[in-house]
Image: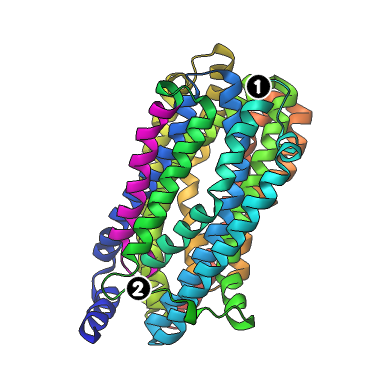
Amino acid sequence: MKKRKEDRYEMLTCTPVPQLILRLSVPTIISMLVTGIYNTADTFFVGRISTQATAAVGLVFSVMAVIQALGFFAGHGSGNFLSRMLGAGEREKAENMASTGFAISLIVGVVVAVVGNIFAEPIAYALGATDSSLHDTLSYMRIILIGAPFMMGQFVINNQLRFQGNAFYAMIGLMCGAVINIGLDPLLMFVLDLGVAGAAMATVSGQIISFIVLFIGSRQGDNIRMRIGNVRINGYYLREIINGGAPSLFRQGLAAVATLLLNHAAGSLGGDAAIAGMSVVTRVLMLLSSALIGFGQGFQPVCSFNYGAKLTGRVREGFFFCVKWGTLFLTCAAAVCLFFAPGIIGIFRDDPAVIEVGTVALRAQAASLPLMAFIVMTNMMLQSMGRGFKASVASSSRNGIFFIPLIIILPRVLGLTGVEITQACADVLSFLLAIPLAVSELRLMKNTQ
């Protein structure tokens, strides 16, 4: 066991940084792409039913974003801390944090499932459901809420495995769930004629499988094992989870608020077709950004472990490596979206009104897409270093600080066009904010090398 710990320390602190990031990021890129594909699968298959069903899935995305926010809060909060503690040689604290983060996710997940189902109808109307989409929205949302504890739990285990440098098994766990989800979607929706409810059942089934596989994987080899006796729900560990997880909570939580406001604005100006069009664009951009996030997740354990070991030169090197190649990838992806936007939207829903809205929105967001590499890597670096306040500001900018005022103002001035360009405008402003946040830390690390 001691030999394996020494090998892991040497791997994370001595392997050339580009080689190490690529080794860790390939499994996480695959994981995130697979997750993005199966998050998009529901939209694709539901698009075969009706525009109202497509809109319903888009509306419930806000609820899923809240569940993900809480899962990432506990997962990133505990994962960042345990990685720094492993880098500093404090294994007992790392073990306590792993169990504590996991326990919190399960408790919160059960609360969300129960409360959400009790108030499902008021929540659906608050999300922007219309009379024509209410039934599909409720059918999809009630089942998704039942899976909340499993979704949150799998996010925690997945992130803890990644921060320990075991990205490969984390990938396997997510891929198992994705395969189940994609396989069950057409079976439950069309063969068994369960419609939108079948799509939700497929999603939750995939999450349960991922949860089981990841939990088993967390108990293999020299991974930190979660034990009831190690749960420490006290001020010290809660503060550390908040410090490391707040940026993720703000980022994902504000994504839920942003989606809610976006759906309301789109629905008031263009009805179900506009909601469906913006929903498709959101899923397409999520799929593209998932590859970037996977790349960044390969950087995170390198960043947190080496920062804990006081090897700040490696942190700087990793940051610039990820920004350079992330920007290149997103530039290529943006070109594809600009030229083939109508065809991309049409894959999901062959409705002229949906395609018209989605094409304008996708092209607008493609124009600002390359800026996301710097924004995302800045957030991940600050979060992995334990810079909770700065990371929270960086993570809140895209979907909160800038997006929320813009989604209120631009549609009033520009109508539906304002809805379609809001995210692109928010991305430009977020990029400008990220520059001083990143530069201040990079200079500080350079001076302390």
Q: Position of residue 437 (x, y in %)?
A: 57, 64
At 44% across and 37% down in the image, what residue appears? 202
Q: Residues within 10 Å of mark 2 (few under 14, many from 20)?
A: many
Q: Position of residue 421 (x, y in %)?
A: 62, 32
Q: Is residue 222 above or below residue 129?
A: below
Q: Residues within 10 Å of mark 1 (few under 14, many from 20)?
A: many
Q: Position of residue 58 (x, y in %)?
A: 59, 33
- Residue type, mark 2 in image: Arg
Mark 1: secondary structure: helix
- The residue indicated by pointer 1 is 272
At 77% across and 37% down in the image, what residue appears? 409
- The residue indicated by pointer 2 is 314
Q: Position of residue 306 (x, y in %)?
A: 37, 77
> Which residue reaches farthest top?
352
Start and end of the magenta stretch?
A: 162-188
Whole-number angstrom distance, CA of label 1 to CA of label 2: 49 Å
Residue 32 appears in view: yes
